[in-house]
Image: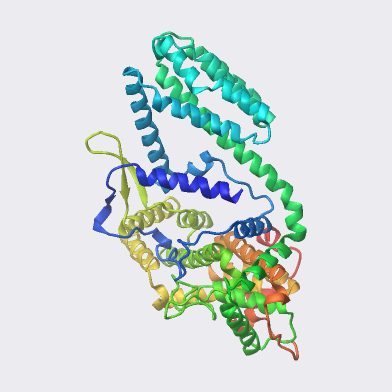
Amino acid sequence: AVALVVSASGARAAAAGGTGVGEADEAEGEKEPGAGASASVNGGDSHDDSNSVPSEAELKAMLARKLMQDPNFQLPSGNEQLDGPAGGLQAVAKMVNVTARRALWQMIRQDFGEQRYDRFLALVGELAQRIKSLTPHRPDLQRDVDEALDVELIKQQIEHADGLADWDLNPFCSFVVERLKRLEAPAHNEATARWLDEFQGRAADSGADRVALLAQFFDYCHDKLDQIGIDTANAFLRGLVPVMHEHGAQFVQEQFREQIEKGKVTLTRTNAWASAASALAKERGLGPCSAAVVHRLGVVELVLPGGALAGPDLARPFADANGMDLLPETMAEERDLLREVHAELLKLERIALAVLRVKQVVPSAKPEALQAVYGILASDVAPFVLAPAEDGSGMRVLLLGEKAIGKAICDGVVNAVGKFHELTEVDAQALRDLLVKSFDKQPESDRTYQLVASRLRSIVRGLIVPAKEERTINAKGLGKALGALGVAPLSVPVVRVAARLLDFCTRDLQIHGGATYKFTVPSGSPSASPAVAADPTPAESARSSSTSASSDSTAEHT
């Protein structure tokens, strides 16, 4: 199943690389695209595995981790992979595919006009091979396909009919679609039959464009074959979920130990991280606690922006000052997930700062206004825009610069606030100036940012690091803690990102646990949780005042 995704992605990349779309324009002469409020969030660390090709065993371990991470995981269909907001990379890929398809069928149209059929027959042969590949152990079905889609026979039929205009498409097209009906999920049969009826009606029209009909037919069949492959893989994945739930951790651990024995992996960074996490737990005065708490502390301080075990550069959390990788080898397979969590936490800090800037200019800002502001700041901004070419020849891909994206976001926030509060020109400009500072690539020098970031990080620690009972108390007080900070709209995203990191901690400890990690667990009298000892915040006071069952809706969501 993983190989299916990898091969599909590779095919699309090859198509994108081999099709000329035109040179991209770049706004304002900038050479690197930004991403608005999260422009400096998406940078990676020093690790580069772009040239590594995973083995079959590594692919299986990756799939096992994915199913442990998300029991409902399914492979997306081709349409779902390409669909996306206008202006995104998905739209660019879609445009490339459409351009390549149009060029191919223009050549085939020219071939038919010159009574050359090699290119079209190659498409027939490819379609036949794809259909046969779905039934590798049924030679009888494969023989049927060979007989019905015999390219030499089809060539003779076209030549005998004196060209494409008089060739009867129905036997050829009906066989293929009926075979696809037998192979696809029964739930799709009715729609497939309806499509075939409509297609045959169009083909019966003597004035129909036969090349256009064939292009539609091949597009439909390949989309169907893609979906059948995806459905088959997803059915297989659903059958694996119970096995992965019970044995997934053991399977991944065995694969990892095998990599160590073969010398492909060492535990140098892992041991250094475990030692640092143990020392940090002792330094923060944790009383008797479990290895799980020390593990969660180590993970949080590695992933959290500005964490005690993270790299000094917020944009490269898993690299030290010399650019060396800090991420433990045990977590390397989930590097992308940890990057995403780090980026989301950093983005929340920027959003919180921007929300406070709005309240600074409009102290009486309504909750509805702040919610609208959050919606704008939290949405993803694609650095690509599709725009009509000046000569009317088609669409052009425009690459926006950071300033253009930042300006668009600032204008959106000001307009959103203006719908609920009357803003003077002075207020609007003051708000824009403050928002621009919120998007600064290095906001660490801003004292307001330091305060916001420190409190948010402490709140997140309190939702992940302590034992279950204390985490529950902190979750119930989350609404009050964020409200005291003035960023109540962030309750749900904070819960969501904390849950992702907590799930990772649980899964990672299941896989490696005592077999790999060697923690030194603090002993002695109980003391404050690491969240409180590290950085006292509103979460500490909220803990004692919000233990009742009548907590806000955020606690219920948690």
Q: Is residue 363 visible?
A: no
> In this picture, is 423 found above or below 387?
below
Q: Pick out the residue farthest to the left.
A: 391
Residue 330 image offset from top left, x and y in percent: 61, 71
89 left or right of 367? left
65 and 73: which is toward the camera = 65
Query: Where, quadrant-wise, is the C terminus in this rendering?
Result: bottom right
Residue 199 image offset from top left, x and y in percent: 52, 17
204 and 155: which is toward the camera = 155
> In this picture, is 182 found above or below 322?
above
> In this picture, is 19 found above or below 451?
above
Q: Residue at x 58, y 31 (%)?
A: 131
Q: Quadrant of residue 297?
A: bottom right
Q: Residue at x 74, y 63 (%)?
A: 550
Q: Pick out the residue farthest to the bottom.
A: 524
Residue 238 image offset from top left, x and y in percent: 71, 47
Q: Quadrant of residue 505?
A: bottom right
170 and 199: which is toward the camera = 170
